[in-house]
Amino acid sequence: MTHGSTDSRHDIALATLRVAIGGIFAAHGAQKLFVYGIEGVSGAFGGMGIPMPGITGPLTGVVELFAGLALAFGLMTRLAGFGLAVIMLGAISMVHIGAGFWAPNGVEFPLALMAGATTLALAGAGRYSLDAVIATRRSTR
């Protein structure tokens, strides 16, 4: 295997992870904002004992939606991944840890999302991303 094909596979792997993880987060954020609404998500967060639910509930929805879309397109990938990893750390520590490991209520799914978001925050978007397009344009100026 040549170095070039390894790089290409790495970039395809990052793009696949970005689109999957970003799509999941964007869908959950849209659900919070447009299905449950501000009052619904605030009430749900309050019921789970999350502090300042009127702020943290809608803010979580906004971050999940927009950072999820950013991940999917590879835009500000490291920042988006970091923000989403922090949200999942909060979800795990405040909501899911008491239910054990297994889904549907345990840490299994949010831990997988946190791992994916953390991986993207550390590795970046890869070659097939808006981040790469922006970097290329900046380097040619």
Image: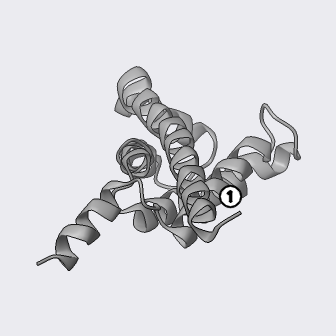
Name the residue located 38 percent from the left edge and 31 percent from the top edge. Answer: 39
Q: Secondary structure at mark 1?
A: helix
Residue at position x 71%, y 63% in the image: 1
Q: Nearer the viewer, residue 101 or 136?
A: 136
Horizontal side of residue 74 vs 138, given as left or right: right
Q: Give the answer, above or below, for where 74 lies relative to 42.
A: below
Q: Dividing the picture into quarters, in which one does residue 93 lie?
A: bottom right
**Is 9 on the left or on the right of 40, as rendered?**
right
Residue wearing tag 1: 115
x, y (%) of residue 88?
A: 61, 54
- Towards the viewer: 60 or 65: 65
Taking the spot 21% from the left edge, 78% from the top edge, the residue there is 139
Q: Is residue 105 left or right of residue 110?
A: right
Q: How many marks?
A: 1
Q: Position of residue 60 (x, y in %)?
A: 45, 48
Pinpoint residue 51: horizontal percent, then vertical percent: 53, 55
Q: Amino acid at mark 1?
A: Ala
Q: Quadrant of the C terminus?
A: bottom left
Q: Does 75 sit left or right of 49 as displayed?
A: left
Which residue does the image show at 81% across and 34% down from the upper left? 103
Q: Nearer the viewer, residue 77 or 46?
A: 77
Q: How many other residues sit within 10 Å of disc 1, few (<14), some (14-19) or many (≥20)?
A: some
Q: Position of residue 110 (x, y in %)?
A: 69, 47
Residue ranking furthest to the top: 35
